[in-house]
Amino acid sequence: MASQDIQSFYNEAVRLEKSGNNKEAKDLYSKVIVSDPAFHLAYQNLGVIYAKEGNHAHAIDAFSKAIKISPDFKNCYNIAVSFYRLKEYEKSVHFLKQSLHLEKKFVLAHLLLAQIYQIQENDEKTEIYLTNVIKIDPKHKSALGGLAMYYYERNRYPESLRMLERYLLLYPGNAQLRLIQSEILAKQGHYKASANLLVEMSKTDAGFTSFNQTLEAAWKEEDEMAKESLHRIQGKAKKKLKEFQAKLELSRENPEEFAPPDPQEALDLSLLYLFNGNPEKAMQYLVFAQKMKENTDSTGSS
């Protein structure tokens, strides 16, 4: 087949792919490859279609052939994503690092490395690659949210608060991260600022009173890391709230054995109720925590 005909087949395959006719596009890409086994773009596009269809084994084969013919940072990333989907994390890391060797500032590779290292519970490398993304793109939504929640889950509250403030300044509509901001303010002793934020949210955020129902709708794929962190927190919140409610039930039978929550417990309960869609209870425990803290401080200073 003449090179001009091969190019025509390839162009038609691209047109079919863009119009959603993937089966016909795959057939034409395959014909191009038979006629010219060194046509790396046909392998690349074939790999993309297979990946979209969830056929990652075939995608990996196609991307591997494209990389052998013409090493490219995007194809290294593409094959890394397919390995990631198959949970073959070490192979994914290998190709992501190859991608960065070819293009050091390729944000998507840094971000996926951070996600993999988070799964592997490698805190140091998770932080490094999230920080790399922000150095390259200071307004990167997913990295700002992901790093904010990374710090929060490790009780590094001042750093988490700084990241939350940066995120919410750029992307002010995320009610869930504003809840985290309120909780951190309270943990740092800024009860009034925390309560004011909750009052403001209860008036302005439509989804504030139904956290569970709105969690999924609030996040887009680009905020995957922060979303996963919030899912973990929400799961823990449900478990802790059930434990507290069971304890409260027992107290009705044996009130003399029930001790009221200390300021930190009250603060934790406030967040638990927030994450379970009960802002009224949340506010009650926040006010209780503030009063307990004030009483403790006045007793300590007298």
Image (tube, helix red, strand yellow):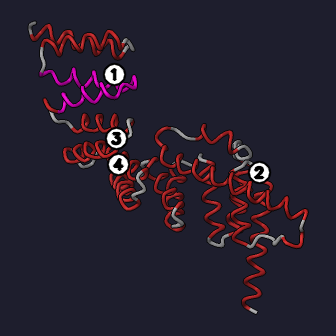
Report the magenta stretch's main SS.
helix
Element type at marker 3? Answer: loop
138 relative position to 292: left or right: left
Q: Is residue 249 left or right of residue 299?
A: right
Secondary structure found at label 2: loop
Q: Which residue is mark 1?
A: 49
Q: Residue 222: percent from the left, percent from the top? A: 46, 41
Please give the name of the residue rendered at 63% of the width and 48% of the height, measured from the top-left corner: 175
Question: Which residue is at 19% across, 28% downward?
Answer: 66
Q: Which residues are magenta?
A: 38-67
Residue 4 drawn above or below residue 175: above
The residue that label 4 is drawn on is: 113
Residue in view at x 24 percent, y 49 percent: 104
Mark 3 neighbour class, 10 Å CA radius: few under 14, some 14 to 19, many 20 or more: few
Question: Which quadrant of the structure image shows residue 260?
Answer: bottom right
Q: Position of residue 70 (x, y in %)?
A: 14, 32
According to the image, label 3 marks what residue? Answer: 88
Location of residue 75 (image quadrant)? top left
What residue type is disc 1 on? Answer: Ile
The Cα atoms of the two marked residues, 4 and 1, are separated by: 23 Å
SS at circle 4: helix
63 in the magenta segment:
yes
Q: Is residue 56 above or below residue 179?
A: above
Three-letter code, disc 3: Glu
Circle 2: residue type: Asn
